[in-house]
Amino acid sequence: MSTEAKKMLVTAMRTFLFCFLLAVPALAQTYTLSGKVSDMAGHAVPSATVSAKSIATGHSFTAETNSEGMYSIHDLAGGDYLVSAVAGELQAAPIKVTLAEAQTTDLTVSPTPKGARAF
C-alpha cells in the first residue's frame, strides 16, 4: 500500500471515529411518561400540573393536563420517578414509576383533597 493510500485510510478512519463519537449521545434512550389525571369519580381533571421527579438526580419535569385530563412528559431518562399531580386544592400522593427500555408508561392518578390520607 502506498504512503498516499495509507494517509487516505488513516483520514477516513479518523473521520469515521469522529462521526461515531458525535453520534453516541444521540443514541441515549429517552422515554415518555403519559397518562390521565382524574378525580375520585373518574372525571378528567383539566389544567392539573403533573410532576415527575427523578429519584436518582432530584430533577423535576412537569406537564399540564389538557381538557381531557391527558398529559405527556417527553425525553425522560430511564430510571425511577416519583409522579404526582396538583389541581387547585386537590393533590395526588406521589406514585413510584420506573421507566425502562422501550417503554411508555401510562399513569392515571386520582387527586384527593390536600391533607387527606391517600390509601
Image: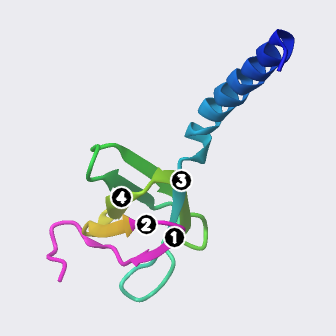
Q: Is residue 60 left or right of residue 25?
A: left
Q: CA distance from mark 2 to mark 1?
A: 6 Å
Disc 1 crowd, CA 10 A, few/some/many (<14, 14-19, 20+):
few
Q: Nearer the viewer, residue 97 or 20?
A: 20
Q: Which residue is mark 2?
A: 100
At a point 25% along the width and 69% down the height, the residue shown is 93
Q: Quadrant of residue 108?
A: bottom left
Disc 3 crowd, CA 10 A, few/some/many (<14, 14-19, 20+):
few
Q: CA distance from mark 1 to mark 4?
A: 11 Å
Return the x and y of residue 61 as percentages of the image width and height.
Answer: 42, 48
Q: Which residue is mark 4?
A: 79
Return the x and y of residue 34 as percentages of the image width and height.
Answer: 52, 67
Mark 3 or mark 4: name the one nearer the start of the chain. Answer: 3
Mark 1 or mark 4: name the one nearer the start of the chain. Answer: 4
At a point 73% along the width and 23% down the height, the residue shown is 15
Quadrant of the snapshot with the C terminus = bottom left
Magenta part of the chain: 99-119
Which dot marks residue 46?
A: none
Q: Nearer the viewer, residue 4 or 94?
A: 4
Q: CA distance from mark 3 to mark 2?
A: 9 Å
Disc 4 crowd, CA 10 A, few/some/many (<14, 14-19, 20+):
some
Q: Quadrant of residue 4?
A: top right
Q: Which residue is mark 1?
A: 103
Amino acid type at mark 3: Gln
Amino acid type at mark 4: Gly
Disc 2 crowd, CA 10 A, few/some/many (<14, 14-19, 20+):
some
- Residues at marks 2 and 1 touching, judged by CB atoms closer than 8 Å: yes
